[in-house]
Image (cartoon, rainbow, N blue to C red):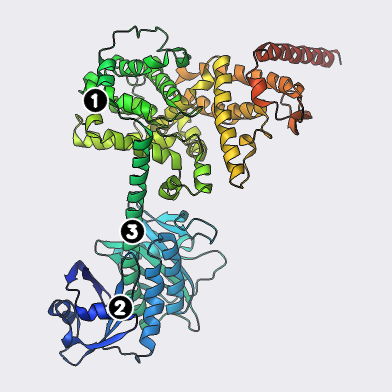
Amino acid sequence: MDAFVETVGTSVLLRRREICLTQRIIDALESGTEQAEYLSSMGDDFKSVVEPNLEGENPKRRIVMYPIADRPFSLVVCVIAPKLTEERVPLIVYEGFLRLFSQIDSLPALLHVVTEQAKLLLKAEHCSVMLIDVEHMDLFEVQYPSNNEMRNTQTVKRRVKMGAGITGLVVSTGKLVNAKNPKQHPNFDPTIDSYPDIECKSLLVFPIRDQSGIIGVVSIANRAGASHFDGMDEEMALAFSVYCGVCVVHSMVYQKLQEAHIRNALANELVMYHMKVSESEVSRLLECTGFHGNPHVGSLNFNPRALPLRELPCYALKMFDDLGLIKKFNLNRVKLARFILHVKKGYRDVPYHNWLHAFSVTQWAYAALVNYDLVAKGYLNDLQALMYLIACLVHDLDHRGTTSRFQIVGQTPLAALYSSAGSVLERHHAAQAACLLNTQDCDVLAPLPRAQYDRALLLLRDNVLATDLANFFRNLDEYKSIASDFQPSKRAHSQALRALLMNAADLSDQLKEWAVVKSTAAAVLTEYFKQGEMEKSRGGAALSIMDRDKCFIPELEKEFLVTTCVPLYDILARIIPKAQPCLKVLESHIEKWDAATHVFAEEVGSEVSLQQVKFTNTGTLRQVPVAAGLAVLLSPELDTLIEQSAMEIERKRLLEAEEEQAK
């Protein structure tokens, strides 16, 4: 039952003023129609806010209240002494306010309404709304969702520099610009202030404000029925912009409330799914006297899956100790042990993205720190090394065994929370990790000074988000350019290397012996096929790589190595020459998968569908049985058959070479 005033006329109050929710206001809300009163009959607190903005004194001023009842809050628009005929006022109010405030629960939909209403009120041909992104210090325009998309799905249509064009001038000065001939304006930039296929004849650009300042810009082009916008249009635009700002801010607050509810639901789900770590478990880890000195743990091609599962937390704790991180950062061993055990229990029992995978990734990161001398040679500093190891431990925390695409298509709570920012799963992993690090008994980073602590959390976020391969491919050209002239002192270069090291650790199973590569493929494909079945069960279509009836395993694995792993480790090797042997290992595995192509193609079972596949070594197209899948991959005879196939391929190659030489 609270009421407050935020704006009067074209001004946003420096702070919102609370007023008494009088019976007159309540009656107006309950009536659902406009109510007329004299201003003198309103409460003193209301009059103290309004009267300083009025010209002269007139106790007989009429005030017309227009209620807009809605959730999460209701609105009463108060028009004092309207200059327009009173029958026109409701039309303007309901056009300008009702649609804006009815979209408060969806920022993309709200911005779409803002553009449509601005065009309607100002009789313009085109309108765009750009908001300020403080983090990136630029402006962005939102792509509005279509009817069949998620209501809160938000994609960025375009980004522009903060100070460029007439738009940038409005942001910097906070003043409206009415360009009667935009192309002649000294600040006009066609890439920002106009759109393709639209001739910009007149332009009205004005800021959107809230109590903190400018939050965005509205740009309106081409006044219908006139050569330019006039003074009345300017007044209307400024009044409209004030309420746009109020709507946008409330929409953002509402969205954050929704996200908070979803986070709470996810947190509760996590707590319900996983058991708490007992003090006895922590004590057993700290007091363990078992042998944890396997000499190969520090090797880059070591198979961590050969270690007993119960000993993995001991080895994880030992890694922090061996690298001197516990002593260097004065970490609490009890909290670190509890954190590791919580992380272990934070992984679900899925075929691949489980605790064993997390430990395997962490082991390779540990080996990279040791073998590549990452800190000693200045590739990473001590804090970056610490967060590299922690990020590897948590990088898939609470993974559900499904992809981000599955979450988005299924409109899951995770998608509702993170789809607008991209990297749905990775953002969830990072959020769960940050939540765990903020828990009192697991706050491992507590000894760090505040500035270092904040930097550590940013490193954690960036490292985990880097494991989204979509980000890797998006930045691939930039990575190649950086690798040609790597300078660790440059921030962008250092950030690129940290991302590459995260990817290298995440995909390090491909650098292990052939048996590990096969078992990894089987685990990943088991997850994929389960997701494919779920997608089919809900009436959708599964991607071919997730459809056990369409996936041809050797070609899939070979393509992954050629298009993802080879470019990744090649770039890493250009920056860190010691990583060069990784490429030799990948070449060997590619040859094996190439030979396996023929083996899988010959394993024709009953009711096996066929798919046309191009064989890399010969360039020929053949129909192969695509469902000969996991059964062949897990067959104990596969390696023998692959060896025979490789020998046959080599024999044919030599024969062709001899024939070519004879010619």
Q: Which residue is mark 3?
A: 254
Residue placed farthest to the right in the image? Answer: 663
642 to 198, vertically: above or below: above
x 52%, y 19%: residue: 511
Residue 92: x %, y % from top left = 39, 82
Secondary structure under tag 3 reads helix
Mark 3 to mark 1 CA distance (whole Å)? 36 Å
x 33%, y 58%: residue: 254
Return the disc, 3 or 1, that comes first in the chain's sequence: 3
x 41%, y 16%: residue: 309
x 64%, y 21%: residue: 633
31 to 188, vertically: above or below: below
Give the residue type at disc 3: Tyr
Q: Which image quadrant is residue 2 in?
A: bottom left
Give left or right: position of 436 versus 50: right
Q: Which residue is mark 2?
A: 30
Residue 132: x %, y % from top left = 35, 57
Give left or right: position of 403 versus 234: right
Q: Residues within 10 Å of mark 1 (few under 14, many from 20)?
A: some
Q: Which residue is mark 1?
A: 335
Give the residue type at disc 2: Glu
Residue 385: x %, y % from top left = 33, 25
Return the disc, 3 or 2, that comes first in the chain's sequence: 2
